[in-house]
């Protein structure tokens, strides 16, 4: 059985990490049985690339959601994307990168930098830790995230610029989805694992950001997330 190591649910979502939620959603979409044991700091420390999620399967430990999904498709069959043309796969790849490599860092800004977002993040991610970890870890983790944001480049922009960048991505996603039920058309594909994970992580947590407000102006995004939730998590 595939073992999925990921953060515990938070913010009322299957996972407050869009990458963890992406992989769990993919496993559910592909109908692959998995177990997700509770993780302690020990399992977090064993993440091969220092990031979550990771899996263990048939004696291998694998990290990075895109590599993991590639491994699962190769080993268990590609149950979701075989109907896509090469051109559709190219578009799906571009939208995946938009969310994972760009929009992600704008969401990080709303959670780890903006004051209200940080209060919610600290409570949701660290409040359950034993003392003194729940006091010591939050500022260290926050500093680490700020360092990563600067390394990516997003952290070098002003707040206003970051919001403008994030809004542009959200508008592109909303316009591309349009009236379709799923991002690539009538049927779901692996891009929807990313789409649902990122959009639900924008729309549903109690982090009141300009990005969330912008996403809320597109009813199709809310309807899309609800459609995915009912289909795969009901
Ligand atoms: N490219 C990776 C990204 C994973 C990622 O960024 N995970 C975040 C949680 S959303 C993480 O573990 N961050 C902890 C850290 O950077 O220290 C993937 O697709 O799995």
Image: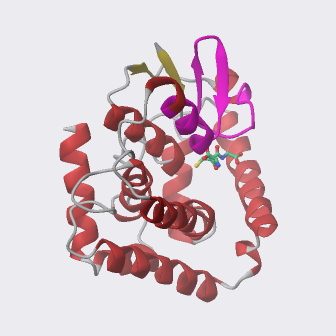
Vertical side of 42 occupied by 140: above or below: below
Q: Nearer the viewer, residue 90 or 53?
A: 90
Q: Nearer the viewer, residue 52 or 60?
A: 60
Q: Residue at x 69, y 21 (%)?
A: 42
Magenta segment includes 179: no
231 horizontally vs 89: left or right? left
Vertical side of 105 occupied by 160: above or below: below
Task: Report x, y in % for residue 71.
Answer: 57, 31
Q: Residue at x 53, y 30 (%)?
A: 74
Vertical side of 44 occupied by 115: above or below: below
Q: Nearer the viewer, residue 112 or 85?
A: 85
Q: Residue at x 70, y 30 (%)?
A: 47
- Quadrant of residue 202 within the rendered picture: bottom left
- For the image shown, how many numbered marks are present on the structure? 0
- Quadrant of residue 232 within the rendered picture: top left
In the rendered image, the quadrant that contains the C terminus is: top left
Task: Report x, y in % for residue 83.
Answer: 33, 49
Task: Report x, y in % for residue 145.
Answer: 72, 57
Q: Residue at x 33, y 62 (%)?
A: 184
Task: Report x, y in % for residue 169.
Answer: 49, 77
143 horizontally vs 217: left or right? right
Residues shaded magenta:
45-73
Magenta segment includes 59: yes
81 horizontally vs 103: left or right? left
Q: What's the coloring here?
A: secondary structure
- Quadrant of residue 224 within the rendered picture: bottom left
């Amino acid at each position: 059985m595939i073992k999925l190591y990921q953060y515990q649910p938070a913010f009322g979502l299957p996972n407050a990490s869009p990458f963890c939620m992406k992989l769990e959603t993919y496993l559910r979409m592909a109908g692959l049985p998995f177990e997700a044991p509770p993780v302690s700091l020990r399992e977090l420390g064993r993440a091969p690339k220092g990031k979550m999620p990771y899996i263990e399967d048939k004696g291998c430990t694998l990290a990075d959601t895109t590599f993991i999904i590639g491994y699962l498709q190769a080993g268990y069959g590609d149950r979701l994307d075989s109907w896509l043309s090469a051109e559709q796969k190219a578009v799906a790849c571009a939208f995946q990168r938009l969310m994972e490599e760009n929009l992600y860092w704008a969401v990080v800004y709303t959670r780890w930098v903006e004051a209200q977002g940080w209060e919610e993040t600290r409570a949701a991610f660290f409040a359950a830790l034993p003392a003194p970890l729940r006091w010591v870890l939050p500022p260290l983790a926050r500093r680490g995230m700020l360092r990563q944001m600067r390394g990516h480049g997003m952290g070098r922009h002003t707040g206003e610029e970051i919001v403008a960048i994030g809004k542009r991505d959200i508008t592109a996603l909303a316009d591309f989805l349009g009236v379709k039920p799923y991002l690539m058309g009538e049927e779901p594909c692996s891009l929807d694992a990313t789409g649902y994970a990122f959009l639900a992580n924008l729309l549903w947590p109690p982090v009141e950001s300009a990005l969330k407000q912008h996403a809320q102006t597109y009813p199709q995004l809310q309807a899309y997330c609800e459609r995915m939730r009912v289909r795969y998590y009901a």
